[in-house]
């Protein structure tokens, strides 16, 4: 495996382990290291993300493929797509246009958990 | 809701939406913004994380509660526990001791996805 910017290459799309609904969780993170959101992708969403350089997901509630920003305009331009050690989680590194969260917050993680 | 360091407070443990297995995905991120791993937590794991200041998870494969570092020593000291807008994903901000990944890599996300 080659190294590029310290990141080993080498996981093929076919090696990703989807859950029993055919989905894999995807964490999106911006250039400043901010964790923006967590959503899910199916094989087609990952394929489109890699092919177009724009973040695609699969909406569990709407049961359809979804390109981030297709209605809001707040798209995510892909800088890297990484896979974890177990091949069952994906990380999109993105340049986020506008707020990532539908609430208008820059990130979906804007509240603390309390007992 | 009060603001502290730009983060609104206010989600109670009882408001977290667990999936049908009683779990919620948890993203762990270090102080440098690095995404370390994704794992799952049940209510008890979240409760222990908040109570002890050490990251706890629930292992789906071993079907048991798990404190990160309990065998490896590579524990995660909690700096903040955040909840997303839908209350169905958690973000642990941590100080990571040693590598987060069982492969010895600093993060579980050390490979690129390729078509």
Image: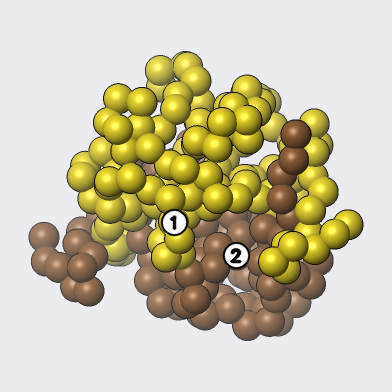
Chain colours: A yellow, B brown
Classify mark 2: residues with Cα within 10 Å, few (<14), some (14-19) or many (20+): many
Quadrant housing residue B87: top left
Is A63 left, or right, of B82 in this rendering? Answer: right
Q: Residue at x 63, y 83 (%)?
A: B97
Extreme-left residue of the structure: B1
Is B95 left, or right, of B73 in this rendering? Answer: left
Q: Quadrant of the N terminus of chain B?
A: bottom left
Give the image location of residue A106, x and y in percent: 28, 53
Is A75 left, or right, of B31 in this rendering? Answer: left
Q: Residue at x 47, y 43 (%)?
A: A77
Compared with B73, A58 (above or below) is above
The chain holding disc 2 is: B
Which one is nearer the viewer's eye here, A92 or B76?
Answer: A92
Give the image location of residue A45, x and y in percent: 58, 27
Give the image location of residue A108, x and y in percent: 33, 49
Q: Nearer the viewer, mark 2 or mark 1?
A: 1
Quadrant housing residue B50: bottom left
Which one is nearer the viewer's eye here, A20 or B45?
Answer: A20
Q: Is residue B15 visible?
A: no
What is the distance, in whole Å, between disc 2 and disc 1 at their CAs? 15 Å
Compared with A38, B53 (above or below) is below
Q: Is residue A3 visible?
A: yes
Q: Quadrant of the C terminus of chain B?
A: top right
Residue A30's disc number: 1
Q: Residue at x 63, y 35 (%)?
A: A50
Residue B36's disc number: 2
Q: Secondary structure at mark 2?
A: strand
Give the image location of residue B11, x and y in percent: 25, 55
Classify mark 1: residues with Cα within 10 Å, few (<14), some (14-19) or many (20+): many
The chain holding disc 1 is: A
Q: Residue at x 55, y 37 (%)?
A: A53
């Amino acid at each position: 495996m080659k190294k590029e910017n310290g990141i080993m290459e080498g996981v093929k799309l076919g090696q990703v382990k989807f859950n029993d609904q055919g989905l894999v969780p995807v964490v999106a993170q911006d250039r400043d290291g901010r964790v923006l959101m967590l959503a899910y992708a199916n094989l087609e969403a990952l394929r489109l993300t890699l092919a177009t350089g724009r973040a695609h997901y699969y909406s569990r509630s709407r049961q359809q493929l979804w390109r981030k920003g297709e209605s809001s305009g707040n798209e995510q331009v892909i800088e890297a797509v990484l896979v974890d050690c177990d091949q069952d989680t994906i990380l999109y590194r993105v340049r986020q246009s506008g707020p990532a969260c539908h609430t208008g917050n820059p990130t979906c993680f804007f509240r603390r958990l309390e007992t």
